[in-house]
Image (spheres, rainbow, N blue to C red):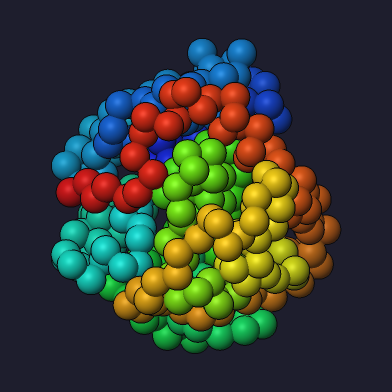
Amino acid sequence: MKYLIIGSNCFSGGSFINYLLKNRPKAKIYAISRSKEYSSSLLAYKNNLSKNRVYFHQYDLNNDLEKIVSLIQKETIPYIINFAAQGMVEQSWTNPEEWFTTNTLSLVKLLDKIYKFTFIKKFLQVSTPEVYGSCGNIKETMNFHPSSPYAASKASADLILYSYFKTQNFPVNFTRASNIYGPYQQLYRIIPKTILMIKKNKKLQLQGGGKAIRSFIYIDDISKATLKILEEAKPGEIYHLSDSKTISIYDLVNLICQMMNKNIDDCIEIIGDRIGQDNVYLMNNEKLKKEFSLSPQVNLKEGILETIQWIEKNYETLKEFPDYYIHKK
């Protein structure tokens, strides 16, 4: 069994590798990221005793296409998971062409090189619910209504992949997950950032007063579903990875404050909303439950506790890292 993880340094990619190491003991895992491998405090699989089964390559999807294609062909890798993407809604308005270059154009170039490789059993595209825009009880058949360059670039990627499935029988699946969280998440994301700001005795800037409604799902539940879909799902299918429970960002921050014995009024500063912010996107996850009997197993409080423990264990290292997004071209 061989797996290629594109975007291996990201939270979801690194955590999925860690899950593979635990659940596929004979697998060879090829990891690709444009950055050097992160340290063990920021990358889950670096703490795994079986990490020697991970073969890391510092390749950039935008600039090292031939090297990536050569690796896939030389190793005849049957399972490919694409976590790589320029994320962040607000920043995508500044240089939208960079989002489309990474999220869409480079993917098109990769597809053009690999879609005829008959040894590929599955290509899994990690998409986003933001392709739908702001709406509730979204099913997988919902039309796209993106409201930012980021969301539009991801929607474009999904459409080109689906066209290769329809016309070339390219075996692709799509996952769209609600807000993922857990240990090793990027420090600028709401849950780890809230924990870090409390520990630093600094106030968290809460956009729009935290009115946005979200559904949060723990990273291990995401990894379990991702592997199931990768190996067993019928090509062309889309799956929502989500919890049916919802919470406002304000209530989420308040919960973290309570768990850390703090008063929310002492921990937040309310600021204006960002451009392109979707107030709500709540996804229907009945398809995943029906086909694979999968539903979230880790509740929000348990997952937050795991995240707090990760930050506390690595605090001396993590406090030196920026807790805000830094754009990489």
Residue toward you, 27 or 217: 217
172 above or below 40? below
In x, y percent, where is residue 191?
56, 51
Q: Quadrant of residue 30?
A: top left
Q: How many labels does the image show?
A: 0
94 lies left or right of 161: left
Residue 69: percent from left, percent from top: 29, 38
Front residue (pair 308, 289): 308
The quarter of the rendered structure image containing the N terminus is top right
Above/below status of 258 relative to 19: below
Picture coordinates of residue 102, whole percent (x, y): 25, 55
Name the residue rendered at 55%, 57% in the picture: 266
Camera-nearest residue between 326 and 92: 326
Is there any visible trace of residue 195 in the rendered image?
yes
In front: 273, or 295?
A: 273
Vertical relation: 253 (above or below) 153: above
Q: Residue at x 71, y 53 (%)?
A: 258
Residue at 66% across / 67% down in the picture? 251
Q: What residue is rendered at 63% in x and 40% in y?
A: 307
Q: In this view, does 284 lie above or below 33?
A: below
Left or right: 115 with respect to 1? left
Res. 131 in view: no
- Residue 58: give x, y in percent of width and height: 28, 28
- Toward which corner of the image does residue 250 lie, by quadrant? bottom right
